[in-house]
Amino acid sequence: MSEKATNIVESFHNDEIGYKEWFYSNLNGYIFNHFGTAEMNKLHHASCSTLKTKKYEGRWTSYEKFCSNDLRALVKEADQVTKVGWSFCKLCEKKGLLFLR
Ligand SMILES: [Zn+2]
């Protein structure tokens, strides 16, 4: 894998097809949900169960999602796009899925 490819952060907004394509080809990636409020702005590992809630089926990208295989790059992106703050998903953290190498 080239250094370049691992640093890419992609974003999906009202783009269900694009997001699903990314999701199913990056099952070990990371996803930052940019809802807009500090409590709701969460960074997850792609395996997180909350990312598959049936309730949101078909409108996963009604709010903006930032996706990357590079956790460090995604953290940087989250810092840049949010003005109110964000946090790691507690569930993902508990499972040890979010650690910076
Ligand atoms: Zn999570």
Image (cartoon, helix red, strand yellow):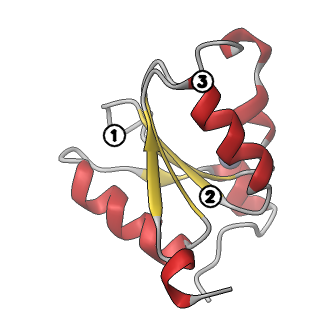
Of 25 and 58, the residue lying toward us? 25
Q: Mark 3 sits on what residue?
A: 16
Of 1 and 99, the residue lying toward us? 1
- Measured as percent of width and height from the top left, residue 27 is found at 80, 55
Q: Mark 2 sits on what residue?
A: 30
Q: Mark 1 sits on what residue?
A: 38
Residue at figure coordinates x 45%, y 61% from the top left: 9
Residue at figure coordinates x 60%, y 88% from the top left: 2
Query: Which amino acid lies under the numbered mark 1 shown in the image of this protein?
Result: Ala
Res 100 quadrant in image: bottom right
**Distance of label 1 from label 3 (alpha carbons):** 24 Å
Q: How many marks?
A: 3
Q: Nearer the viewer, mark 2 or mark 3?
A: 3
Left or right: 74, with 16 as reference point: left
- Measured as percent of width and height from the top left, residue 50 is found at 73, 33
Residue at figure coordinates x 43%, y 73% from the top left: 73
